[in-house]
Amino acid sequence: MPRKWPLAQRVTRLTRTIPRGRWCSSAAAAAPDRTPTWFPPDCWFTVDSRFNPEEDLDAELDRLQTIIADAADEIGAKGTVDVTQFQPAAGTPSDHPAGVALARCVEEVRGVPARFEMCGEILENRWYDQLGIPAVGFGAGRLDVSHGPDEYVDEDELLRVAAVYALYAHDIRG
């Protein structure tokens, strides 16, 4: 039977310190109940964390690398970290013309003013931001349960979102 690797426990504890609304996943935190996973003697896993503008990206990477190095040292294992993406946070202000247009479409379809909130899960926006392209995310469902075991989307909300997208596309084309 595989032994519980201390890294699983440490990464699981780390995921519990991440502010609500940020997404972090790994083999150690993938179980629906967020219990530590059992690792074989040789394994690999990924950690994907998205950062908000107020967070220090370098400090968070250093914290994660320290946790991995300490856990590997604790059991006499070799631990390595390969960073495949290292992107700063990005955001388009809600008063940008793209945000204003989206808000107008949302209100027209839903009949209530749009509500903007930070969503750390939209990695594509970071790439657009680096190119100077404004980007906003919009979709069905609730951020507080997205990408988790209790995620759900109301079917009527999917239809409303489709209507907002259609209206937005029409509006921005002129």
Image (cartoon, helix red, strand yellow):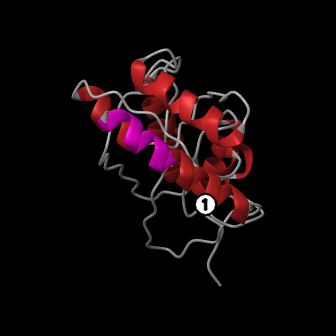
In the image: residue 133, left or right of residue 42: left
Magenta-drawn segment: 165-173
In magenta stretch: residue 172: yes
Q: As displayed, is residue 146 above or below residue 105?
A: below
Estimate how packed mark 1 is, as few (under 14), some (14 to 19) or many (20 or more) residues with alpha carbons within 10 Å. Answer: many
Q: Quadrant of residue 114?
A: top right
Q: Report the front residue among 111 and 90.
A: 111
Q: Amino acid at mark 1?
A: Ala
Q: Report the front residue among 160 and 145.
A: 160
Callout 1: helix, strand or loop?
loop
Residue 119 seen in the figure? yes
In the image: residue 152, left or right of residue 140: right
Determine the residue positioned at 54% across, 45% down: 164
Provide residue 9's location: percent of width, then percent of height. Answer: 67, 54
In magenta stretch: residue 166: yes
In the image: residue 18, left or right of residue 62: right
Q: Quadrant of residue 30?
A: bottom right
Determine the residue positioned at 69% across, 27% down: 113
In the image: residue 13, left or right of residue 95: right
Q: Identify the residue under disc 1.
A: 28
